[in-house]
Amino acid sequence: MNLKNLAALIIALLIGVGAGVLYSSRANRSVAVKGTAFLREFSFSDLAAQSGQTNWNVLEDRLYEPFPSQAHFPRIGRRIVAQAEITDIEFGWFTTKFHQAAQNALDKHQARNEALFDLVRDATRNVDHKPVRSRFHLPRRYYAIGETHGVADIGYVSEDGRVTVIITLMEGP
């Protein structure tokens, strides 16, 4: 084999590998992700009812399908944001029931919990010589349902009697 043939073979191999990588990355991005029944059928009203609160104002319940083209991998997402006024007594009950209701929703769809990272912060500050309590609880659950992997951020932020629930569900292959 002469040097000219070897150079042509190496160039052909590089072009083939480059084309294969380009094709597979484009094919990966064009894969439509359907989302599990958990993501599509997640019921905020059921979660709220199990938490003992029904006076929610749902600000957003949106399905992101398809995910933006800048996403590294094909995904489907959903975000729910809701607010309610809750007394201190109701808030104690709500916090206990809320995360149990979120876990029940995952269990209902036979999700395998892969990991849980939790973040909780409580603070009190004075506003006009009156103590104002605030709290945020933002757990992140990684789960799998069949071959679909997902992330569920189901948490809340509260301050001075107002609670905002923020739910973000994201799934991909």
Image (tube, helix red, strand yellow):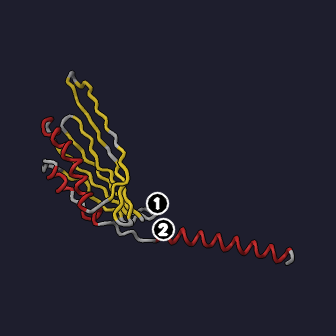
Image-based side of 115 in relation to 1, left or right: left
Q: Residue 13 carries which label?
A: none
Asked if the residues shown at circle 2 and circle 1 are in contact, with their CB atoms under 8 angstroms apart, the answer is yes
Q: In x, y percent, where is residue 135? A: 27, 36
Residue tagged 1:
71
| Kind of element beneath mark 2 | helix
Q: In x, y percent, where is residue 94? A: 17, 43
Badge 1 local density, few (<14 within 10 Å), some, or many (20+)? few
Q: In x, y percent, where is residue 64? A: 35, 62
* Amino acid on which disc 2 is placed: Arg
**Between 4 and 60, which is closer to the camera in this rendering?**
4
* Amino acid on which disc 1 is placed: Ala
**Residue displayed at 22% across by 23% down:** 128
Q: Whole-Å distance between the Cαs marked 2 and 1?
A: 8 Å
Q: In x, y percent, where is residue 84? A: 18, 45
**Residue displayed at 60% across by 69% down:** 21
Earlier residue among tags 2 and 1:
2
Residue tagged 2:
29
Q: Which quadrant would the N terminus be assigned to in this image?
A: bottom right
**Between 4 and 71, which is closer to the camera in this rendering?**
4
